[in-house]
Amino acid sequence: MLSVASVDGRGVEPVLRRDADPAESARASRGWWDRQAPGYYVEHGEFLGDVDFLWGPEGLREGAAGLLGDVAGRDVLEIGCGGAQCARWLATRGAQAVASDVSHGQLTQARRLNRETGIDVPLVQADAQHLPFADESFDVICAAYGAVPFIADSAGLMREAARVLRPGGRWVFSTTHPMRWCFRDDPGQRGLVVEASYFDRRAYVEQDKNGNATYVEHHRTFGDRVRDIVAAGLTLVDVVEPEWPDDNDEAWAQWSPLRGRLMPGTVIFVAVKEKVASTPPVG
Ligand SMILES: C[S@@+](CC[C@H](N)C(=O)[O-])C[C@H]1O[C@@H](n2cnc3c(N)ncnc32)[C@H](O)[C@@H]1O
């Protein structure tokens, strides 16, 4: 439904809406991104920039958005990093950035780009649902369409981010705007007609002839995401819905100028882990 990539090999397998549990989803994502990583880079690498932080197809970049605050000297974790473009950009801003992804194929691209740019961010292969980091390890965690759209247990992911975040830290992630799930995955006129229920939380699944998922994306409503963030003990401080700018005429799969001028395609949630209030002195 909401392909973040439109590279080879998609569309030939049956697609449907059905449940997909966390293990099946992670397995499908790992396989799909391993296979598609080189093609994804060829198709989107230039727009992403090898050392840049792109929040989504609208073209909003962190240099302009400033959603992470001043990262200089901060420990920053990027999850679902793909080619680690964002982490590399953060390193140029003085952050101690670590980039993680479930896909070895994506991390192979990241390693190549580290070499070619000379900005060598540490890379960690990990499922974002089980981050291999101690509690309170990072000041900032970010994901630009990384991991979040592909994870079945959204509430668990928010808890995991909250766990590795230090008090006072910030968790910022972009994902497909939930309202897009009402529409066909089509950048043109056909993508302007409501065809599905916004309230249908079943996953979008592509599967092989044996019924094994080969690609999975998960839908949560706006309210679900807010509830998951709050339930993880975080405070939601901002929600950004980037508008499609006049100077961007580049479609990215279902995200196109036509649709972007009429409705949001990306949502960015900004949450913080509050510092525990200190006990007032007695007397
Ligand atoms: C659309 S890419 C985002 C990367 C980069 N910001 C970009 O825009 O190209 C999504 C990334 O999420 C990763 N991913 C999917 N499921 C994941 C999971 N369970 N844990 C960690 N990463 C995951 C994929 O491997 C992929 O690299």
Image (cartoon, rainbow, N blue to C red):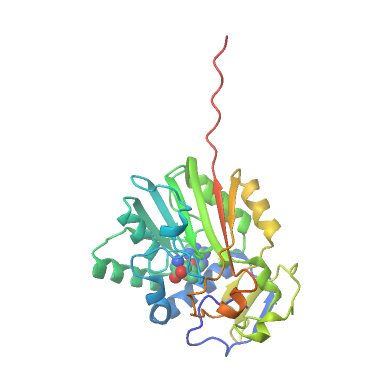
Query: Based on the displayed image, in which of its 4 quarters is residue 44 positioned?
Result: bottom left
Kindly tell me whether residue 214 is visible in this rendering: no
Q: In the picture provided, is 37 more to the left or to the right than 6?
A: left
* Front residue of this view, candidates 79 and 266: 266
Is residue 234 placed above or below 199 in the rendered structure? above
Whole-percent x, y for residue 50 in the image: 34, 69
* Front residue of this view, candidates 83 and 205: 83
Q: In the picture provided, is 94 more to the left or to the right than 218?
A: left
Whole-percent x, y for residue 195 in the image: 74, 80
Quadrant placement of the N terminus: bottom right
Quadrant placement of the C terminus: top right
Is residue 170 placed above or below 178 in the rendered structure? above
In the displayed image of the protein, which residue is found farthest to the top?
283
Whole-percent x, y for residue 144 in the image: 48, 63
Whole-percent x, y for residue 16 in the image: 67, 80
Image mark count: 0
- Could you tell me which residue is drawn at 62 percent across and 83 percent down? 186
* Front residue of this view, candidates 234 and 238: 238
In the displayed image of the protein, which residue is found farthest to the front?
246
- Could you tell me which residue is drawn at 34 percent across and 47 percent down? 72
Query: Based on the displayed image, in which of its 4 quarters is residue 260 positioned?
Result: bottom right
Kindly tell me whether residue 144 is visible in this rendering: yes
* Front residue of this view, candidates 152 and 246: 246
Q: In the picture provided, is 14 more to the left or to the right than 69?
A: right
